[in-house]
Amino acid sequence: MGRESQQGSAVIWALLVTIFAMMLATAVCYTAYNSRKMAASYEREVTLRLAAEAALLEALQRVEKEPVLVDTGMIIAPSEVETEKGTLVVQAAAEQKAGSYWLVAVAREKSGDVWQRHKIARARLEKKEDGYVWKGRSR
């Protein structure tokens, strides 16, 4: 082999190593981007879940003070809650189902992308004398 063929094979090897390094860098960037998007998505889900649970607890407190609210259905009218990630709409209602009373709280994004996210929190109530007793939560 001559000197020119050795230089040619060295150039080819250098080109292959450069292409491999570029592909590796692209994969790392893609993974970092997806990880950031997944973390942001998880944060949105947690914020919605916590907002729904807070609305459920507020509805439970209102029912304790005024048990007649269960008969009206709407415990918390839709209202907007500002977060650092955007505006959420929360509401809570009561319904009778299979002999039990259920409080259902919903938190949803006011505006979102194609898939508008929401979370629901539920609690079962049982009628006792002139009020209601909380019998637990349901997922």
Image (cartoon, rainbow, N blue to C red):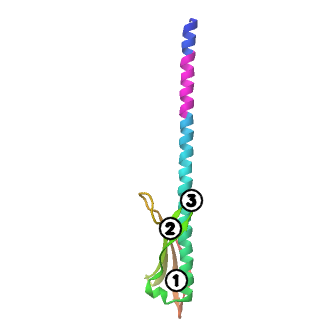
Residue 106 visible in the snapshot: no
**Would you name the residue on which mark 3 appears?**
43
If you read the primary sequence from the N terminus, does the residue marked by circle 3 or circle 2 appear first? 3
If you read the primary sequence from the N terminus, does the residue marked by circle 1 or circle 3 appear first? 3
CB under 8 Å between discs 3 and 2: no
Q: Amino acid at mark 2?
A: Leu
- Please report the residue visible at 53 percent of the width from the left and 47 percent of the height from the top: 34
- Which label belongs to residue 48? none
Residue 31 visible in the snapshot: yes
**Would you name the residue on which mark 2 appears?**
88
If you read the primary sequence from the N terminus, does the residue marked by circle 1 or circle 2 appear first? 2
Which one is in front in this view, the residue at disc 1 or the one at disc 3?
Answer: 3
Q: Amino acid at mark 3?
A: Glu
Region of the chain picked out in magenta, as a range: 10-23
The secondary element bearing badge 2 is classed as strand
Is 21 rendered above or below residue 90?
Answer: above
Which one is in front in this view, the residue at disc 3 or the one at disc 2?
Answer: 2
In the image, 37 versus 94, the foreground residue is 37
CB under 8 Å between discs 1 and 2: no
- Please report the residue visible at 55 percent of the width from the left and 55 percent of the height from the top: 40
Q: Residue furthest left?
A: 114
The secondary element bearing badge 1 is classed as strand
57 relative position to 117: left or right: right
- Which label belongs to residue 125? 1
- Please report the residue visible at 55 percent of the width from the left and 70 percent of the height from the top: 51
Query: Dividing the picture into quarters, in which one does residue 136 lie?
Result: bottom right
Is 98 rendered above or below residue 116?
Answer: below
Q: Amino acid at mark 1?
A: Leu
- Which quarter shows the N terminus? top right
